[in-house]
Image (cartoon, helix red, strand yellow):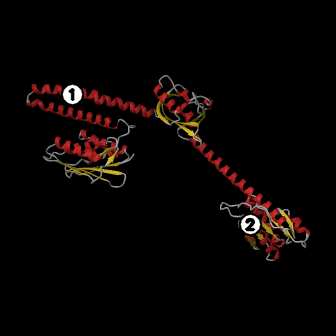
Amino acid sequence: MGSGSEGIGGDAIRGSDDRGESPGLLLFMRPGRDRELLIEALSGRYRVETATDAAALESTFDCCLLDTAGFERAAEAIESRRERAAPAFLPFVLLVPEDASGPTAERAWERVDDVVDLPVKRAELAARVANLVERRETSLRLAERERRLEETVEELRLKERVMDEAPVGITLADPGDDDNPMTYANAEFEELTGYGSEMLGEDCRFLQGEETDEATTARVREAIRAEEPVSVDVLNYRANGRKFWNRLTVAPIRDEEGTVTDYVGFQTDITDRKIRERRLEVMNRVLNHNLRNKMNLIDGYAELLREDLDDEHRKPLEVIEETTDDLLRIAEAVRKIDHTLSSPDAAEPSMVLRDRLSELVSRFEDRYPNATFELSVPEDDPLEVAVLGLLTAIEEGVENAVKHNDAPNPSVEVRVDRPEPGWIAIEIEDDGPGIPDHETNVLRRGETSLKHADRLGLWLMYWVVSKAGGDFSVATGEGCGTTLRLSVPTES
């Protein structure tokens, strides 16, 4: 290699890997003066490694320089090494001394990217290597860009498949002042509504009809104008004119600058749920109004008959009166459950449970002077909690503990502790006769025959705790008392 007087000029080439290191050169050639001169000329700009074993071609490098002997040993491996590097460009350079035979150089052009005749000036060699390395780095950037593009396309395809195959209706709509034209609707939306791609470009108000509540649709429009998410239950109409209840959620989609680019809508058929809710509403009204009125009427006439009958005929009236009282208690228990849990979306304000429990125990002491009540709470802990109906559930547990204990001086203890951060556990323990297994199994099996109407209180406590995401348990036994445990989170 000619020594030349020119140095290798120009700025250093940017590193080819993520760590910012200089590009790597592999000198696949025998030790000697030419190799030493190459190392001296190129090491200031590149990371230079040397090798004579063909296995070195499997290492990582950005350009490989070979002498004729190295080319003869590695010629067959070069092509396979290029294929493994694809789609990135991996350059190979053959260095041919002036005494080498011509056929080697001619044959090399089929496998290498440049043939350099030695001797060569440093500046020329550096420029030719730099050109190949720059092509290499450009190809790496393009390959990485292509890889990321393929990943992005695949991610978009996956998201599109998710939307297309989602078990809920999904639509996309453009933002607008008055209309929000639909730009996409998945298969479930068409299955749910009967409307398909023919409605693209139309505002989704085509789902509305004569009985659609205007206040509900106005709420949706106001949220869209305010660029806020909204969820409503709305009566909509299918393409065939059939009505259905739709749980509709609409939310804005924003770009990186925060500008709303689309609105996404989710539609779910909740017709069965709405019918069930309406049915329960009617049944509750019948139970709490009609049944109570009829039972009060029966009770009143039974009292009138009692005054006119002798002792022999009063026994059937007593059965009638007991049955009437029990039915009235059932009606009252159902009314209490409905009142306690009838606001599923209402936010319960946080309360200081320590103070509320002290007030509760004081009321029970006045109401049941022969009973003993104890309250145990952690010291210096206000026990703040926000659980819908929790105090009613505790009151129900204490009330039933006294009412179902025939002892002259029943005892009830209420204990509160924090079993772990973020949770409060309330235990209500009594010394009563215990609750039969067939009545507590209702919480596991979901059905039972109640000996006492007040056992509906178990359901009340269970539903209050379950709604809060907590746990409710009953530990009881014949003649050895009952312990109710209500464990609830302190934060929603």
Foreground of the two, 213 or 323: 213
Which quadrant of the figure has residue 193? top right
- Cα distance, mark 2 to mark 1? 100 Å
Few, some or many residues within 10 Å of mark 2 (<14, 14–19, 20+)? many
Q: In this view, does 133 lie to the left or right of 205?
A: right
Residue 245 location (% of width, % of height):
47, 31
Quadrant where the C terminus is found in the figure: top left
Residue at the (46%, 26%) spot, across then down = 215
Residue 449 visible to the viewer: no
Residue lying farthest bottom?
32
Disc on res. 46: 2
Q: Earlier in the sequence, mark 2 or mark 1?
A: 2
Residue 488 location (% of width, % of height):
34, 48
Q: In this view, does 13 lie above or below 220?
A: below
Q: In this view, does 23 lie to the left or right of 220?
A: right
| Element class at badge 1 | helix
Q: In this view, does 492 lie to the left or right of 480?
A: right
Disc on res. 296: 1
